[in-house]
Every structure is written in structure tokens, then in C-alpha cells.
Image (tube, grey):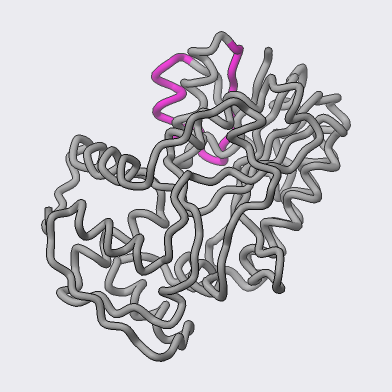
Amino acid sequence: MRILVTGVTGYVGAALAPRLAAAGHEVTGLARDPSRAAAASALGLTVHRGDAVSGAGLDTALDGIDVAYYLIHSMEAGEDGFASRDRIAATTFRDAARAAGVGRVVYLGGLVPPDRAASPHLASRLEVERLVMESGPDSVALRASIVIGAGSRSFRFLVRLVERLPVLPLPAWRDFRTQPVDGRDVQAALVAAATSQAAGGRSLDLAGPDVLTYGEMVQRIADAMLVGRPPLRLGFTATELTSRVAAVVAGESHELIGPLMAGLEGDLLPRAERAAEILGLRMHSFDAAVERALRDWEEAGEALAAR
């Protein structure tokens, strides 16, 4: 199959392109700055210069493509906001994919709460899913919870908090539950989604086997890092304030952390439509995912002061 991976410079796309090539597919990439696509370039894969917001380069990149992966998310600061940019980019890509006759578009988004209004961040992901699924009736959407991997910004954020805080202040959202997923399992699901007949036209939830509260996740990351970090249970949430403080501590952008923490308003659990069963996957446990992610982190040459 001829496959295009957008967002090929990102954490997910950079790892996906080599896996698809190893599976025997003819793979190309799309990036605003192809020089940053080191993993794809090292394999000799063509990386097209393009921009989904403006539409520049999409016609060339999508020409003759059977399956396209849409891995584009906007979290940068800007007057128009990430939701507006994501809407424009998804609409532009949908129209270009239709015009090129792409057989299937695969999208990776986030779990959506079934019992309450989604946060702006998750609502935007859901809107992008809807637009991308309009690319064709055989398209596939995967919704994942927190991805556990050395390059996952959500996971890195949690690790930096554990590393840098002697006590872990846990606001009221600490008791809400979710099902984090190993980055290796995300990759396996994405590869399988290219060819799975059973997945065609469906939106599937991708979740690990462990149901954990956010507080339990942080504590188990601390245990894996072999550090003592006593929890401090706070009686409030104050998301705007706590997200700004947490972003500073972790050395992250508040444009990323603010929307992510705004989504911690209740349980975020998968629906019955689960990707593991439909795609035939075996999922790693949370503890195994954390151990692997921390090992990859250190093997990449990044020090973990607390480990």
C-alpha cells in the first residue's frame, strides 16, 4: 500500500513511519519542515513539505495514496486558538483527501467523556475526528487516553513533576479514573488500522488494561522512579492556577498543559467499541509501559535526576 503519514516529525508519526515501512508499505511523510523528519529521512523515505492549514503541498503529497494518517494537532499559542486551527486543518485535509481519492484516513484523537460536556481540548479532538471521518466511508478513528512513552508530552509532564517536586500536590481531580495506554500499543494499533477490514468506518477507543485514578498514576510513576514523593491531597481544583504552576515546574508550555488539565473533570474511560479486540492486540500493563518509557528516556541520553 502507498501510505502518507502527516505529522511525521511528531512523537507518534516519527515512530510510525518506520514501522509501516518495515511492514512492507510504501511510505511517505508530510511536514511543515521536512528537515526535522530525521527518522523518516534515515530510512530514505520521501517527506513532502506541506501545511494542512493553508493546504500547501497536500495535492502532491496525497497523489496516489491509499491510506493517509492524520496526526496533526495544534496546541501552540495564537490569537485564533488551537480549536480554530484544528478545524481549518482538518477541513482542508478532508477535502484534499476526497479529491485525491484516498481510500482510508486514520486519525488518532483522545477519549471523550460519555456523561458530560467535553473540555475545549477534547471537544476539538472530537470535531477533528468527525471532519476526518468524512474523508471517506472506510476511514478509522482511534481515541486514546494518556499515552505512556518517552516522547509523549503528557507522560513527560508527569515525570517532570515527580522529579522536581519533593511533595506531590494532587488537586480534587486526583480521584477521577482513566486507562492509560502504552506507546508501543498505540503504534501497533495504528499499523493494524491501515489494513483491518473490521475497523473500516469505525471510531474505536484505545485503552490499556489498567483502570487507574490520576493520583494512582502519579504515585506509580514515582514508585518506578524509585523516589519517595508523599502525596498532598488538596481540597480544590483551581485548574487555571494549578495548570500554570505545574507548567512552570515541568518546564512545559501552558498552552499545552492548560487545555490538558482542563479535561480532568471526571472519569475518562473507554466505550464498548475497543480497538484491542477489533484489531487483535494484546495490551501492556501500566507498570510495564512506565518501565519501558523510563528506560527509553535514559537510553536516549536524557538524565532523570530523581531516578
Q: Which is more toward the observer, 156 or 255?
A: 156
Q: Is residue 282 above or below residue 114?
A: above
As drawn, is 162 to the left or to the right of 110?
A: left
Q: Quadrant of residue 199?
A: top right
Q: Is residue 29 above or below residue 268?
A: above
User: What percent of the width, then of the height, locates residue 62?
Assistant: 74, 26
Q: Quadrant of residue 248?
A: bottom left
Q: Is residue 138 magenta?
A: no
Q: Who's the residue at 57% across and 31% down the image?
A: 189
Q: Who's the residue at 67% across and 56% down the image?
A: 125
User: What percent of the width, then of the height, locates residue 14?
Assistant: 46, 33
Q: Quadrant of residue 30?
A: top right
Q: Is residue 147 visible?
A: yes
As drawn, is 108 to the left or to the right of 94?
A: left
> What residue occupies the far bottom of the structure in this picture?
235
Q: Is residue 83 visible?
A: no
Q: Is residue 29 magenta?
A: yes
User: What percent of the width, then of the height, locates residue 95?
Assistant: 85, 40
Q: Who's the residue at 48% across and 37% down the image?
A: 9
Q: Which residues are magenta?
A: 25-44
As drawn, is 276 to the left or to the right of 183?
A: right
As drawn, is 282 to the left or to the right of 121?
A: left
Query: Where is the N terminus found, in terms of image quarters?
Result: top right
User: What percent of the width, then of the height, locates residue 155?
Assistant: 37, 54
Q: Which is more toward the observer, 199 or 187?
A: 199
Number of marks in the rendered image: 0
